[in-house]
Amino acid sequence: MFSASTAHAPAVAAPSTVDASAPPAAQTPLSSPERPAPRPTPGRLYAGLAALTLALGALSLLAPSTPSYDPWSWTLWAREIVHGHLVITTTGTSWKPLPMLFTIPFALFGPRVAPDLWLVVARAGAIGAVLMAFRVAYRLVADVAAARLGHAARAPAALAGLLALVALGFAARGAYITDNGLGYSEALAACLLLVAVDCLLDGRHRAAFLAGFLVALDRPEIWLVWVPYGLWLARRERSMRPLVAACLAAQPVAWFLPVYLGSGHLGSSVARATHPRANSLAYASDPFWAELTRAALPTVMLRVKLMAALLVAAVVAKRWLRRPSRAADPAGRASSGPALTTAAIIGLGGLAWFVVIALMTQIGFSGNNRYLVLGAALVDVCGAVGFGWLAVELGVVGARIARATRVRRAGTTGRGRGPARTVGRAALAGSAAAAAAFALLPAWIQGSDFVALPKVHRALLYQAKLREDLGQAIALVGGRRRLLSCGSVMVEGFQVPMVAYALDVPTTRVLAPPASPLRPGPEPDTILQTRATQSSRLLPRVRDWNPADYTYRGSAGPWNTFTRRCASGT
C-alpha cells in the first residue's frame, strides 16, 4: 500500500566545516539534523481532533442551520426505527449506514434536537477532513525536507499542509462548505479515508482497515480497494482473520437488511440510485466523459491539479529512468523518494476515484458532485505535497548558495551563522516563493476556483429559513392535525423529507410536484409552495390544476400556503 514514514530514520550529523570543492550529495541534508520532536500518540491525536472538530461543529449552530434533503431522510428514518416502523421507498434518498450510526441514537433526544446533533457530526467531519489533509500533506513534505535539508526546515511542510487545507475546504466555488454545512456525509467519509491513509503511513494496518470499514459504510465504491486490502491482511496476519471476516460480513448486512425491512425489497436503494433527477449527468450524451470533465476535475483547483500531475510524472520518470531509491542511503540518511512516491500513489488514487464515479454515472447512477469529495481530498493532498516539494528544492538551492558564500568568507570573517539557521532561512524563502507561485502566477489564476463566501452564506441562510418558518406555514393551514385530516399535502420536491419529519409521517404521506404539468395528477388538498434555492422557481404550481379550487392561506417567510375546501374550514 503506502510507504511508511521516513521521518524517524536515523541521521548522521554533518561536519562542522564544509569543503567547497566537494560536490554536494543529492540526498545529503544541508543542516545538522536535530532529532525531531516525538509525534503525538495517534490515538490521543485523533481523540483531540474529534474533540476539537465536534466543538467547532457545535459552535457553528449559533448561526441559523438546517439539514438538507438526504440528512432529513436519515433523521426521519432514525425516528421511525426507534418507534419500530421504518418505511423506505424507491423514491427519495438512498439508505446509508454511516450516518444512521449517529442519527439512530440521536433520535432518542427528541425531534427538535436530533437534526442539530447530526449537523454537529457532519460539520465536524468536514472540518476534520481539511485538518487531516493538512496532517497527511505536512507529514509527507516533512519527510522530504528532512532528507534534503534536515529537520531544521519545517516551513515547506507547513506550506504543504496549509495548501492542502485551502484546496479541499475553499475550492469548487464553495460546494464543500455548502454541502457539509447542510449535513451531507461525504466529507465525514473523506476524513475517515485520510485517517486510514495516515494509519498506513505508520504501518498501523488494523487501524487503517477499521477506518476503511467506516468509509465503506458511506461509499460502497471503496469496496474495490478495502475488500482486497482486508483479504491481504487476513493472509498476512492470522490474528486479523476474525476481524476481517466480521467486517466483510457486516457490510452487506448494514447496507441491505434495513432496506429489506423498511421496503420489502433488497434493491430499493439501488433502484433509487439508478433513477436520478433530470439534471443528473447520467442523462448526458456521454455520461462518463461529462462526469469526469464537468464534475470531477473541476472539484480541484487548476494549479493543484497541475502540480499533482507534475509530481506523479516526476516520480514515474525517476522510477523509469533510474533504479528505485532505497529508503535510506548507505550512511543511514533518510531519502525523499518514499514520501514522494506515496504522494504520487495518493494522487493516482484520487484520479481512480473520479474514474470509478464516472463509470457509475455511465451505467445510470446519479454522479452527484458530493460523491467526488473523497477523490478530491486525495488529489489535493498530492498537489499540496508537490508545492511543498518545490519549496524544499528552492530551499536546497538557497542553502547551497548561502553555504558557498559562507565558505568563501570563512578565511576573513570566520564561520558566520550556523548551518541550521541558514538552512531554516533558505527553507522559509523557498516556501515563500512556492506560496507566491500558488497564488500569483498569472497562467494559473482562476477566480472561479475559490469559494465565494457571501454567496455561500446567503445560500445557507435561505435553507435555514425554510426550516425556521415551516412551523408557521403549517399553522397557517390549521396545524398538523387538520392538515393531515384533510387529505394529501404536496411540497417542493427537495422539502419532502423535511415536511414529513415536521408532520411526523413517512415520506409516502407527502407528495412531490408532478414531473410534467401536462399530467399533474389529482389535485392535492394542501400545497406548501416554496423554492429549492433562492434562484429556483416556486413549486408546486397552483396553476397546474384549477386555481379557483384553492384558497391562499398566507405566507411564512419563503413559504406560500394554499388549501382546498377541507383545510380552509368551509
Image (cartoon, grey):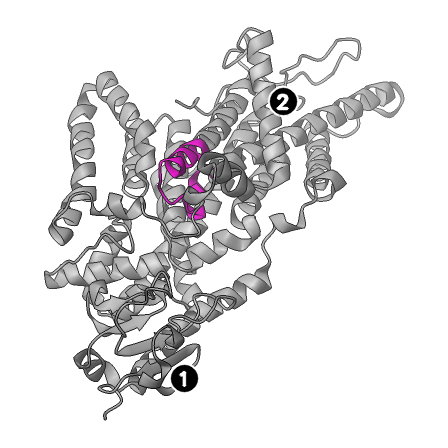
Q: Which mark is residue 555?
A: 1
Give the residue type that dot 1 points to. Ser
User: Distance between the Cα atoms at labels 1 and 2?
Assistant: 66 Å
Q: Residue at x 67, y 22 (%)?
A: 30
Q: Magenta stretch mostly in which secondary structure?
A: helix
Pointer 2: what residue? 148
Relative vertical location of residue 263 with respect to residue 226 in this rendering, above or below = below
Percent from the top left, x then y, of residue 280?
42, 48
Q: Residue at x 71, y 13 (%)?
A: 24
Percent from the top left, x then y, of residue 25?
67, 12
Percent from the top left, x then y, of residue 277?
38, 52
Q: Is 297 one of the magenta-colored residues?
A: no
Give the residue type that dot 2 points to. Arg
Q: Is 374 one of the magenta-colored residues?
A: yes
Horizontal side of residue 225 vs 294, given as left or right: left
Which element is circle 1 on? Answer: strand
Percent from the top left, x then y, of residue 297?
54, 38
Relative vertical location of residue 285 with respect to residue 471 in this rendering, above or below = above
Q: In the image as oriented, which residue stretches furthest toward the right?
A: 412
Q: How many marks?
A: 2
The boundaries of the magenta stretch are 353-375
